[in-house]
Amino acid sequence: MASDLSSFLKDELANTLEQLLSKSTTVDSVSPLDVNSLDDSQCIEVSVKFEFSSISSTWKFYIPSLTATKFEYFMLGGMGDLKEHIDDEIADAVNEIISNVCGSLCTSVNAQGFPDVSSIKSEVLDFSIKSCSDIEDNDRTYNLDLALDGEKLPIYLSLDEIILPYLSSITGYDDSSNHEVVTAPQNASSSSSVASTQPAMSPSVSAISSLLSEDSAENLQILFNIKLKLSVRLGTKNFLLKDILRWDIGEIIELEQMVNEPLDILVNGVKIGEGEAVIVEGKFGLKIKNIGDGSTKLSQIGI
């Protein structure tokens, strides 16, 4: 029985890019990649090792030059000229992005409490600049079609065989005699499909919608043990990478948030309300000033 992590990969890829690049991002589709159709343009290969339970799997992300140059350009706040070719600065920026995507994926998956994917962690092994035509030709390489602020940008992902059951909605892996796919609640905007065989402990999106429509507290209890990450955003501001690299101990960073403005309350990176900081027995606390009702909060966090 293998838990399907496909929707988590797509959601965290989109969410992390949106946070880092300040651009609306979605994963429009995922399809097998015909490596023979690629030209000899540059790409950045980032190898990432994932470990959980007794599984060790290496994924290879390939970021073609069109996508890589846009990533660095938006990371710098859209300042200056868009580069035509990949250089070391772009490679470093892409490596940092993929590292953040994989870290967010692990955090999100660990919060679900899957019985077969526990304490998943990731580690970037290496990254390099290479030709797209050198990508290994196999049936485990996929094209993730991103829409970044309305512009189509591709990312290629090559997987090893051991991870295929855990990304079944992407890979199409199906071995009903040995594996049963477990899916967790998905974001309503996710384009991934839901496996047809699901145990009662992990309901499908349609099942969750049915539970919510019945407005039954007893039925909703099936969702109550889902772990979500709460965070509070003090403020944000875009900086150039060169400025960040110059920061040192004692540096004062001015944010855009005014001192009298409410703080954003985030659940799994999604804003659900506003509040103000308070002190509770010597610790920071949060006093909620503005937040929706139960059904509104469920909708905001994608349940």
Image (cartoon, rainbow, N blue to C red):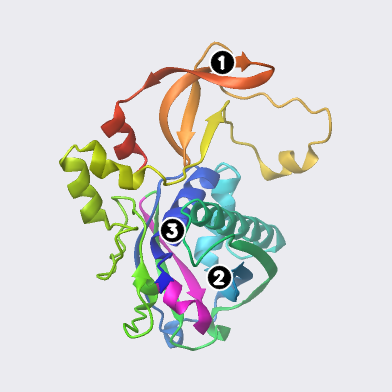
Residue labelled with disc 2: 61
CB atoms of marks 2 and 1 within 8 Å = no
Q: Amino acid under label 2?
A: Phe
CB atoms of marks 3 and 2 within 8 Å = no
**Quarter of the rendering occupied by the C terminus:** top left
Residue labelled with disc 3: 8
* Residue that appears at 65% across and 56% down: 96
- Residue 286: image location, x then y, percent: 54, 20
Sequence order check, earlier mark of 1 and 3 = 3
**Quarter of the rendering occupied by the N terminus:** bottom left
Q: Is residue 202 in sight in this rendering?
A: yes
* Residue that appears at 47% across and 28% down: 265
* 273 lies above or below 211: above
Q: Is residue 285 magenta?
A: no
**Badge 2 density bin: few <14, some 14–19, many ≥20, Cα 10 Å:** many
Q: Looking at the rendering, which quadrant does residue 245 occupy?
A: top right
- Residue 86: image location, x then y, percent: 63, 65
Q: Is residue 303 in sight in this rendering?
A: no
Q: Quote the CA–CA distance across marks 3 and 2.
A: 16 Å
**Badge 1 density bin: few <14, some 14–19, many ≥20, Cα 10 Å:** few
Residue labelled with disc 1: 258
The front one of 170 and 28 is: 170
**Badge 3 density bin: few <14, some 14–19, many ≥20, Cα 10 Å:** many
The residues colored magenta run 150-167
* Residue that appears at 52% across and 46% down: 21
